[in-house]
Image: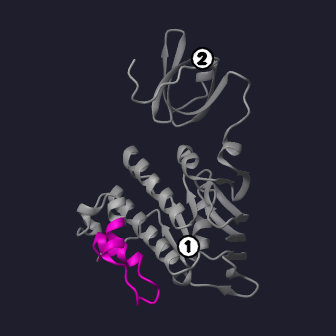
Amino acid sequence: MIKMACRKALHASTGRVQLDVQLTIERGAFVTLFGPSGAGKTTVLRMLAGLVHPDSGTIEVADNVWFDDQKRLAVPPQQRTLGMVFQDYALFPNLSVADNVAYGMTTASHRKKASNVEVDRLLAASGLVELRDRFPASLSGGQKQRVALARALGRALQTAQDGKSPLLLLDEPLSALDNAMRAQLQDVVLALHREYGLTTVLVTHDIAEVFKLSQHVFVIEAGRIVRSGSPSSVFLQQQRQGSLQLQAQVLAVRQEEVVYILSLLVGQDIVEVIADKEEAAHLHPGDVISIATKAFSPMIFTANAVR
């Protein structure tokens, strides 16, 4: 579906970064770009969308060349068959929620407009029915994000219905949502991805989201792909039997008598562990660390289990 070999000079907060990405994505795959901020993930999406041109290289999608610097070819964004969710949402301020979604489902020629049934389906799936007549200025950040996602899905679904190869680009589309809505929309995205045979490229910092949605992940660091494969092969390190290793973010460090207590965020949970003076001396709030523990006979309960 996608063959990309591109180079682009970036100016990140850490300094100049030379983005040099070569990747192939199969038709119908759900793929994640993962890595630290400033690594070049969003730029890869924007190059696919035609919003940013590579300095050199080629982009081929569904056997169509979208960019080739040698041939001086760059297909305009409006002619690329894709839907995209931007980090800044990019909603039309003069259109209602329903009209924003409907706009995404209108063909490039504007001869065929989305039916009310199609729009209503996406509004319902995104929890936007009661907001359909509201305008973007009156929406919260999370509500705007849901509208942007529904509009991008509509564009991709319309492309599929037109008999073309649909491409969906998602740049942290669920980051502003609470856990319950995030989980609901993850299910919606995955269901529509499968139903319409979308090829989906997601940017996220949420490892749990990667495991739930993706078949393949590319880890990008400093402009280059450093690892790729299934989420399990990329993120699950081989550990000694009975050993668990978790990523945690330091929330606070405090001293109690002769030991230090670390308050850590592990997933959505806050835990406290003991550290000695030497370990605590190098830790500060915001640091990301690995913690290992022996768990030869762990007890596993469902979230709603009562004991």
To which residue does mark 2 refer?
Answer: 277
**Residue 212: % across, % down:** 54, 47
Q: Is residue 172 visible?
A: no
Front residue of 191 and 107: 191
Outermost residue on the top side: it is 257
Q: Position of residue 220 (x, y in %)?
A: 67, 55
Left-right relation of 206 to 89: right
Residue at (54%, 66%) from the top-left corner? 169
Q: Is residue 58 above or below residue 29?
A: below
| 144 up-or-down from 5: above or below | above
* Front disc: 2 or 1: 1
Instruction: Please state if 9 lies on the left or on the right of 83 as rendered.
Output: right
Is 80 colored magenta in this rendering? no
First-in-chain label (2 vs 1) = 1
Residue 209 at what x, y percent from top left?
Answer: 53, 48
Q: Residues within 10 Å of mark 2 (few under 14, many from 20)?
A: few
What kind of element bears circle 2? helix
Is residue 110 visible in this depiction of the protein? yes
Q: Which residue is mark 1?
A: 166
Q: Is 116 included in the stretch rendered in magenta?
A: yes
Q: Is residue 113 left or right of residue 76?
A: left
User: Magenta span covers which residues?
Assistant: 95-121
Q: What amino acid does circle 2 point to?
A: Lys
Count of numbered marks: 2
User: In 3D space, how far apart are the residues under numbered discs 2 and 1 (Cα atoms)?
Assistant: 55 Å
Tell me which residue sits at (26%, 67%) in the image.
132
Q: Nearer the viewer, residue 224 or 80?
A: 80
Find numbered disc 1 in the image and state the secondary structure of the residue it sits on: loop
Q: Amino acid at mark 1?
A: Pro
Quarter in which the N terminus is drawn: bottom right
Q: Is residue 197 above or below residue 62?
A: above
Look at the picture and state if 159 lies above or below 22: below
